[in-house]
Image: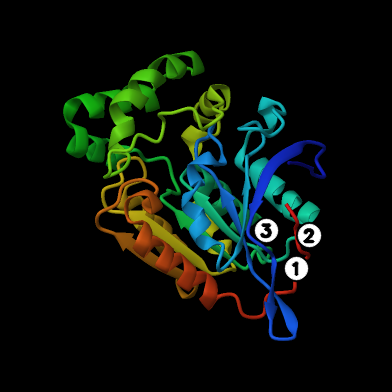
């Protein structure tokens, strides 16, 4: 379904799991988990069906960022982290969601970080999943070299350092073919198949405009909500050393850091059993005192 938000566009979203469950002679509200997909230029489909595992604990809300997937295209001047973060707040308001848990994966983690600093207190807690906080790609190139040799190193460098949107789009096919299988330890290439509705123009626009100046580290000191940072030790595109920088920049009394030794990018793909144990424990630990949110019947 598409939901109209205050800024005048419609965001596509999907909802899994009930919001109210019987609790004796009353009903109990489950917390809401809002999932922010990666990319930019991808969609929510990478989360399915893995996050079905969370529906015993949460009502799960999937959506596509503005300009991406099945959401309204909008215009390039609105393809930026602040607008995407504000969109998430407006979507929650439109759906009547109070105090969501917000999970941002990869690029979605950039949006989640901006949301956490720009809208302190809005969420119950955040999960920064397989993401980074600045644009120093040196550790990325080292990891691609380790996992795929010189060919992978060169393909990554050619793509990420492309001098224009046109050059980046041209380099994308080779990057996805060579580097895609290295994203996960299972060698499942997340860029294969026809599930995702891809938006190459959003990918190249962001990575040629706001992306090169990415530095969320200073604003993480403003975060007021608990944060779970999850990283895979074998992640080539957002290496564990980048997650360490994120953890150090956050208020230390709010952060929990979990490392997965046998995982690449998107830890839920490689070590799902432990991943969902950690995620459920975090949600359960921070769910006390949640408001009885409006139930969403998707």
Label 1 near label 2: C-beta < 8 Å? yes
Element at label 2: loop
The residue tagged 3 is: 119
Q: Nearer the viewer, residue 199 or 134?
A: 199
Side of 207 relative to 74 (left or right): left
Residue at x 37%, y 55% (from the top left corner):
243
Comparing 36 with 122, the one in front is: 36
Structural distance between the alpha carbons of marks 2 and 1: 7 Å
Callout 3 secondary element:
loop
Which mark is in front, 3 or 1? 1
How far separated are the C-alphas under marks 3 and 1?
Answer: 19 Å
Task: Identify the mark nearer the N-term, 3 or 1.
Answer: 3
* Colour setup of the view: rainbow
Q: Residue furthest bottom?
A: 25
Q: Disc 1 designates what residue?
A: 293
Q: Nearer the viewer, residue 175 or 20?
A: 20
**In the image, is 7 to the left or to the right of 246?**
right
Q: Residue at x 30, y 41 (%)?
A: 236
Real-space Cα separation, disc 3 to disc 2, in angstroms: 17 Å
Disc 1 crowd rating (10 Å Cα; few below 14, some 14-19, many 20+) is: some
| Residue 21 located left or right of residue 199 | right
| Identity of the residue drawn at 50% across and 42% down | 107
Residue under numbered circle 2 = 96
Closer to viewer: mark 3 or mark 2? 2
Residue 258 is situated, as x and y percent measured from the top left of the image, at: 36, 64
Q: Is residue 284 above or below residue 11?
A: below
Q: Quadrant of residue 179?
A: top left
């Amino acid at each position: 379904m598409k939901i109209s938000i205050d800024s005048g566009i419609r965001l596509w979203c999907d909802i899994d799991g009930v919001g109210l469950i019987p609790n004796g002679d009353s009903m109990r509200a489950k917390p809401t988990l809002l999932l922010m997909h990666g990319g930019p230029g991808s969609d929510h489909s990478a989360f399915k069906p893995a996050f079905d595992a969370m529906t015993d604990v949460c009502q799960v809300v999937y959506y596509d960022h503005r300009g991406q997937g099945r959401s309204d295209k909008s215009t390039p001047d609105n393809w930026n982290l602040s607008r995407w973060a504000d969109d998430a707040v407006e979507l929650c308001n439109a759906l009547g969601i109070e105090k969501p848990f917000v999970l941002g994966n990869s690029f979605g983690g950039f949006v989640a970080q901006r949301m956490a600093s720009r809208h302190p207190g809005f969420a119950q807690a955040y999960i920064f999943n397989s993401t980074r906080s600045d644009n120093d790609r040196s550790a990325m190139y080292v990891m691609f070299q380790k996992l795929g040799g010189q060919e992978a190193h060169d393909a990554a460098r050619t793509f990420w350092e492309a001098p224009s949107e046109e050059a980046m789009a041209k380099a994308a096919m080779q990057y996805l073919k060579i580097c895609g299988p290295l994203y996960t330890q299972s060698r499942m290439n997340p860029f294969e198949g026809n599930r995702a509705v891809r938006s190459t123009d959003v990918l190249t626009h962001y990575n040629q405009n706001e992306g090169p100046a990415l530095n969320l580290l200073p604003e993480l000191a403003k975060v007021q909500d608990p944060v779970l940072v999850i990283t895979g030790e074998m992640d080539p595109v957002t290496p564990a050393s980048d997650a360490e920088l994120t953890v150090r920049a956050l208020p230390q009394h709010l952060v929990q850091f979990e490392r997965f030794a046998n995982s690449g990018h998107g830890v839920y793909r490689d070590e799902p059993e432990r991943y969902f144990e950690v995620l459920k424990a975090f949600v359960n630990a921070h769910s006390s005192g949640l408001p009885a949110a409006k139930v969403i019947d998707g």
